Image (spheres, helix red, strand yellow):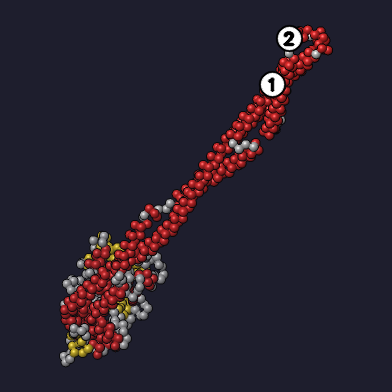
Amino acid sequence: MKILDLTIHGFGKFHDRKLSFTDGLNIIYGHNEAGKSTLHSFLRAMLYGMEKKPGLTKKSELYEKYKPWDNADVFGGELRFSWQSKTYRVMRDFRKDHESLRIINETDQTELREPEALLTDALDGVTETAYNNTVSIGQLKCQTGREMARELKSYIQSIHTTGDANLNAERAISYLRNQKNTMEQRLVPDAARTYTALIGEIRNIERDISQPSYANQLNKYNELRNSARTERTSRQARKEELLQKIAQSEQVLQQSGYKNEAEISAAQEKTGALYKSFEESVKESKKAVRIILPVMLLGLSALSLMFGAAAVLLTGSSGMSGWQTLLPGVSATLSHMRLPVVLAVSLLLCILFLAAGITTLRQNHMIRKRVEETSAQAKEILARQIGCSDLSEDAMHALHSHMEELKNVYHQLIDNRTELAALDEELGKLTEDERAYDSKLQHQHEMQTELEGKLEHLANIKNRAEQLQRTLSENDHITGELDAISLAMETMSDLSKSIHSSFGHYLNKEAGSLISGITGGAYDSMWIDNSLRVYLNTPDKLVPIEHVSSGTMDQIYLALRLAASQLLQTGSSEKLPLIFDDSFAMYDEDRLRTAIHFVMQEYPGQILLFTCHTREARILEEDHTAFHLIRL
């Protein structure tokens, strides 16, 4: 792969800038802040896109770092390269929400449908990380010899055991071990047992609260109690009404002087009998015989007395003549009778007629007295009951109606008392029902309060169960992670040993050859023991890498990067461009001359050398070596 040219539409400080490159060595010269690092980043972004880079926490930081200074709406560019005898144009737009990648095959005049796949093939599968660790070569960043040695040693150990300068097997395994310890501390060992116990408790509570006794019947018993209360209130109102009616009826009966129907009927019959007796007595007293008969009887008694006296007189001498003259018949009768007999008969008749007369008079008197008594009693009843003392047929009819009304009042009283008794019974039952409903409501409130407590407890338990379920899931996840970490540690250890015995061997061999060449034979190879201690071989002894100069360390670093890049591209027909970003800043002129010629000799591909010095170009010009100079 060979880069032909770059066209920067907008990237950092560059705007509408085009740079062309040739085969062999291209020196990109610019003083500090001229934009060498920006150009290098643009090249990498065109090949790999603007994904998150090491040293930047997120993509937005990279975006903000290289956003065009002049016009942020133009953020992107083009890169042309040749590969497998064809020329391709890569076009990228880095703007947010407009990111795009297009590749045109200029040889065939077609646009590729899968541009990412072509770039992967053209880059020989080298990832951006591998690109940064191999073909893109910087300088050791440490300033002191000890720090330089530590950084170089770390690089050698990492690439020797993992094949990647960014991966240090020992540190990675140590990190994984620490992660494993941390995760083991996050495990909750009793979570499963506690979760099982909580699930059992949840089921018991749910089974308990599903019992009919916890069914919410508050509305039902409220309605029943309210219905009983309403009914009781209605019955109580009816009771008050009945009590008022009963009091009125009792008052009426009390005023009448009667307590029951029998007394009313007896009074009615008595009044009727009195009135009948009164009428009969009045009628009897008005009969003519009652007036004449006493007079006649008394007159007969007097006549009988006179008859006896006449008999005495007639039996005497002196008066016989006169009586004979007056009563010739009587005189004739008496003449044949004896005087005692006549006197006895006359006296007897007198007594009889007198007794009969007196008896008749007494009877008349009794009749009059009965009339007065019956009249007085009847009038008294009439006056008390109807307020009228006139003894008449109309008054009796009025009395009859009044008495019938009293009977009706009494009947109504009896009915009202019967209804009152029934009402009292109903009220008692309704009161008992209301109390029962109150008791049930109280029980319901207690049950609902208990249910609320159980539900709250259930909710708390479920929350704990959910938390434990998450804990169990976390435990499962942690267990999986622990298994993965254990597997990773085991795999990394195995791979590290495998890489150490394979890639490390080839790297030692390749780097040893390059080290010998770049150091002018001062060191002929590099050796790493099983403890990953790094040594340089001389004809006489092994020298720990910590004991060599900083210039030698830079040479070793260069040799290792070249060796790694060559191993990474083993079997590739077209090498990737080798990029140096101020990689020779710490070299003196002799080492610089040796390094440049060594690199040009050892690396057959295109080379891009970014520098802020003019000595690289001057040395090549002095040595009459062809190169292409680009000034920024």
Residue at the image point whose x is 27% and y is 63% from the top: 115
- Viewer-side residue, 515 vs 364: 364
**Residue corresponding to mark 2:** 336
Spatial distance from mark 1 to mark 2, Cα to Cα? 45 Å
Q: Where is residue 91 shown, x and y percent of the image?
A: 31, 65
Q: Name above or below for residue 299 compared with residue 505.
A: above
- Viewer-side residue, 58 vs 139: 58
Q: Amino acid at mark 1?
A: Glu
User: Quadrant location of residue 209?
Assistant: bottom left
Residue at the image point whose x is 33% and y is 66% from the top: 468
Q: Where is residue 57 shown, x and y percent of the image?
A: 35, 73
Q: Name above or below for residue 423 compared with residue 312.
A: below
Callout 1: 10 Å neighbours few (<14), some, many (20+)?
Answer: some
**Residue corresponding to mark 1:** 284
Question: For this view, does 50 lie left or right of residue 290?
Answer: left
Q: Name above or below for residue 604 compared with residue 255.
A: below
Callout 2: 10 Å neighbours few (<14), some, many (20+)?
Answer: few
- Viewer-side residue, 137 vs 493: 493
Q: Amino acid at mark 2?
A: His
Note whether residue 432 is visible.
yes
Q: Where is residue 139 shown, x and y percent of the image?
A: 29, 81
Q: Nearer the viewer, mark 1 or mark 2?
A: 2
Going by the picture, which residue comes out furthest to the bottom? 540
Note whether residue 391 is visible.
no
Q: Name above or below for residue 168 compared with residue 72.
A: below
Secondary structure of the residue carrying tag 1 is: helix
Secondary structure of the residue carrying tag 2 is: helix
Name the N-terminal-most of marks 1 and 2: 1
Quarter containing the C terminus: bottom left
Quarter containing the N terminus: bottom left
